[in-house]
Image (spheres, helix red, strand yellow):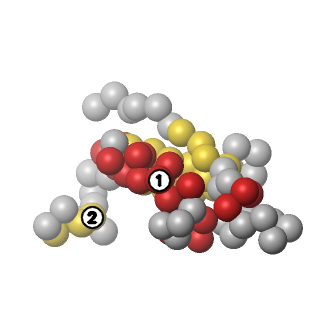
Amino acid sequence: MEERQVEYIWPSKENFPEKEQNMGLKNFMLPESSDYEKIKEYALKNYTFDGFNDKKGYILKPIEDIIYKNMKEYNGVYY
């Protein structure tokens, strides 16, 4: 299986202007945030969060690229 492109994303600061720093992953979970729509687009393309890079932001990878052969699966959930 050929690995697809890894994407990086930073939360938008404009969603929470009263805070000096963004709220991290919470930005992506709040429906009123523009980040919610951004991450929804990635989810529809089967991307998921797979860590954080201090210089580039949150790492997004295709789900198929992080499912390992030794993982167990139950109804589409891997563990």
| Amino acid carrying mark 2 in the image | Tyr
Q: Position of residue 39 (x, y in %)?
A: 47, 52
In the image shown, does 13 or 42 lie closer to the viewer? 13
Name the image quarter holding residue 65.
Answer: top left
> Residue at the spot x=72%, y=66% of the render?
16
Name the image quarter holding residue 25.
Answer: bottom right
| Left or right: where 6 falls relative to 63 | right
Please tell me whether residue 20 is drawn above or below residue 5 in the rendered image.
below
Q: Which mark is residue 62?
A: none
> Residue at the spot x=53%, y=66% of the render?
32
Q: Position of residue 15 (x, y in %)?
A: 67, 61
| Left or right: where 63 falls relative to 55 | left
> Residue at the spot x=14%, y=67% of the render?
75
Distance from the alpha carbon under mark 1 to that under mark 2: 25 Å
Q: Secondary structure at mark 1?
A: helix
Residue 28 in view in this figure: no
In the image shown, does 65 or 24 lie closer to the viewer? 24
Q: Position of residue 42 (x, y in %)?
A: 42, 46
Judged by depth in the image, the label closer to the viewer, 1 or 2, is 1
Of the residues under marks 1 and 2, which one precedes in the sequence? Answer: 1
Q: Callout 2: 10 Å neighbours few (<14), some, many (20+)?
A: few
Q: Callout 1: 10 Å neighbours few (<14), some, many (20+)?
A: some
Q: Secondary structure at mark 2?
A: strand
Q: Position of residue 46 (x, y in %)?
A: 33, 47
Please tell me whether residue 18 is drawn above or below residue 66 in the rendered image.
below
Residue at the extreme top of the image, as rendered: 2
Residue at the extreme right of the image, as rendered: 20
The residue beneath circle 1 is 37
In the image shown, does 68 or 19 lie closer to the viewer? 19
Q: Which mark is residue 78?
A: 2
Residue 59 in view in this figure: yes
The number of discs equals 2
